[in-house]
Amino acid sequence: HAKREGRGRAEMFSPALALEASDRAEMERDLMLALERNEFMLEFQPQVDVVSGRAVAAEALVRWVHPGRGDMVMPGAFVPLAEESGVIIALGDWVMGHVCETATQWARRGVAQRLTMNISSRELAQADFFMRLRHAMATHKTPPAMLELELNESIGMDLPTRVLGQLRALRGEGVRVTIDEFGTGYSNLSRMKDLPVDRVKIDRSLVRDIVSSAEARTICGAVIGLVHGLGLEVVVAGVESQAQIDLLRVLGVTQFQGFYLARPMNEADYLGRYGRQAVALRSV
Ligand code: C2E
Ligand code: MG
Ligand code: MG
């Protein structure tokens, strides 16, 4: 068994799809056990409005703090497998509960920033997804205006009427909806006009080369123009330099998220760095 713990572990955190069936089954069990043992945590990364200089929202990003390894396992190493195996439903419940609880605490402390959480297509496809979300909100008495859902582009464009109706109802109560990873899929753009969303997150891949490539700037500018033209807010993800921000500012973008501004961090660090500014914002 020692061999499995050693060599097997290292492989376990390589891309989920490359796993052998037995390793995959073991990792599914590990994920369920990790949920029972409360080994997951959230980190938060600010989405900053560079005009006001303030964070407007914090994206909640799940991590697995593996007891044997001590370090954090990043979602790229377990979320795909969790999605494939269905464990994402239980994991998503944990994330929802934790985000709702945190959002309520922040609201009570006067931290006027939304918490935004990632929702997998597999989660959204569950008939009781919205019931479970509302249950989490009710349990923690979460102000709807503190919450935002990030749905990735591929889901966003192809939502059944039932889901569209639920999203519309939530938005009516103050929950916000963002299309995540915009520009990475092959979307049916004509459907965008009917989507109940507030905001679009432009994917990192669209802005990566804008400083060096005129073509990349053209594509990025057209996408941003499309989103603004539909009356939606824009946030650009994966910003790694001031030069990118300067170029995007000219295109009318004010909201940014990326390592250049801040890496994801634990809640205490986040509140230390961004909690106070929000209190100031509130007292204005
Ligand atoms: P995402 O929703 O696109 O989240 C942003 C990812 O980009 C995060 O990676 C973040 O650390 C990374 N990032 C932010 N700024 C930069 C930057 O400037 N440069 C680079 N190279 N990367 C940047 P992370 O935390 O590893 O998350 C990866 C993905 O895992 C997320 O992509 C999301 O799809 C998924 N995920 C994370 N947490 C959850 C969750 O609670 N539920 C679900 N369903 N999926 C989650
Ligand atoms: Mg996201
Ligand atoms: Mg993603």
Image (spheres, helix red, strand yellow):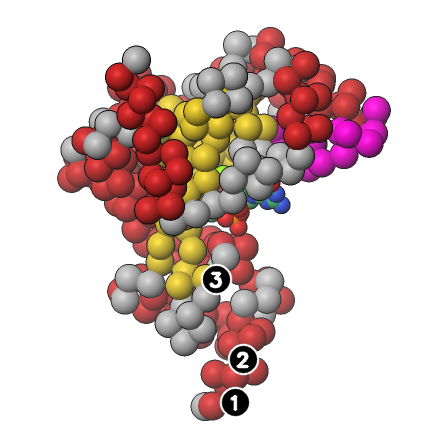
Residue 228 x %, y %: 58, 12
Image quarter (top left, top right, bottom left or bottom right) of the N terminus: bottom left
* Tags 2 and 1 touching, CB below 8 Å: yes
Which residue is found at the position 45% from the left and 35% from the top?
46
Badge 3 element: strand
For the point 28% across and 62% down, the residue is 38
The span shown in magenta is 202-214
Name the residue tied to disc 3: 73
Sort mark 3 into few (<14), some (14-19) or many (20+) by Cα contacts within 10 Å: some
| Front position in the image: 218 or 183 | 218
Q: Position of residue 55 (x, y in %)?
A: 43, 28
The disc labelled 3 sits on which kind of residue?
A: Val
- In 3D space, how far apart are the residues under numbered discs 3 and 1 (Cα atoms)? 20 Å
What numbered label is drawn on residue 3?
1
Q: Judge whether residue 6 is colored magenta.
A: no
Return the disc, 3 or 1, that comes first in the chain's sequence.
1
Q: Which tag, 2 or 1, sits closer to the chain's start? A: 1
Q: Looking at the picture, does residue 209 appear above or below residue 172? A: below
